[in-house]
Image (tube, grey):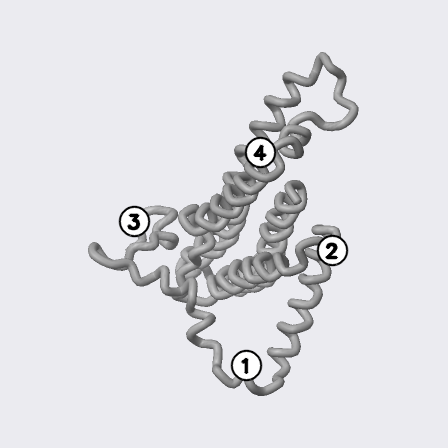
Amino acid sequence: MMTNLFSSFDPTTSNSLSMNWLSTYLFIMLMPTTFWLIKSRSAMMINIMTNKMNYEFNMILNNKNKGSTILFISLFTLIMMNNTMGLFPYIFTSSSHMVMTLSLALPMWLSFNLFGWINKTNHMFEHLVPMGTPPLLMPFMVCIETISTIIRPGTLAIRLAANMIAGHLLLTLLGNTGNKLNEVLLMSMLTVQLLLLMLESAVSIIQAYVFSVLTTLYSSEIN
């Protein structure tokens, strides 16, 4: 029974063990083994998508550290699959929780900054003062750039979680009013829900793309 507005996003299925988080790897368990052996349309589609993402990330990284694009492509695929699987009924959307999104954003941001401050200390100090800054404004720019750097993992995590929660919450609110509507309003509500579902499908891919591209940009600033 729904006790409050956000109960549909409650990750707890029992008092002792939560099994909902297994949905994070559900697409791996459902993926047939023949996908890796036989050329199918789904395999060709994923290969085209991977090549496009590899090209995009190489452009952002200026063709440096080409092997690192595997990390960002894997991150994009994981988030996109979780967002898309969450659109199906009775499947828990792990990417709508800060536990999941912050666990992805914080280690990436921390590893990039540790690498930069340990190996490229002067370069990291240069980033705190943009080129062309007047000497009078330099102390303020250092404070602003430091704050903007510190809040990056939080903004990444909140952006992804908020976008996933907003669409699912709107679909849930519309669906809960279905038993109180007449035939005309019910058909209208179903039409609106179908349009929202199409929008959420696009948002699932766009948010995964935004998350991975921003992470790549943060990496390129250091490298």
- Indicate the position of residue 140 as horizontal and vertical percent values: 64, 18
Mark 3 and mark 1 residues within 8 Å of each other at the beta carbon? no
Mark 4 and mark 1 residues within 8 Å of each other at the beta carbon? no
Q: CA distance from mark 4 to mark 1?
A: 40 Å
Q: Of residues 169 and 207, which is closer to you in this image?
A: 207
User: Quick one: label 4 or label 1, which is nearer the N terminus?
Assistant: 1
Q: Of residues 18 and 104, which is closer to you in this image?
A: 104
- Indicate the position of residue 167 as horizontal and vertical percent values: 52, 53
User: Quick one: label 2 or label 1, which is nearer the N terminus?
Assistant: 1
User: Quick one: label 3 or label 1, which is nearer the N terminus?
Assistant: 3
Residue of label 2? 63
Q: Residue furthest right?
A: 132
Please, what secondary structure does the residue beneath circle 4 have?
Answer: helix
Label drawn at residue 36? 1
Mark 4 and mark 3 residues within 8 Å of each other at the beta carbon? no
Label drawn at residue 149? 4
Q: Of residues 145 and 89, which is closer to you in this image?
A: 145
Q: Amino acid at mark 4?
A: Thr
Viewer-nearest of discs 4 and 2? 2
Residue of label 3? 3
The quarter of the picture where the N terminus appears is bottom left
Q: Amino acid at mark 3?
A: Thr
Viewer-nearest of discs 4 and 3? 4
Q: Amino acid at mark 2?
A: Asn
User: Quick one: label 4 or label 2, which is nearer the N terminus?
Assistant: 2
Q: CA distance from mark 4 to mark 3?
A: 38 Å
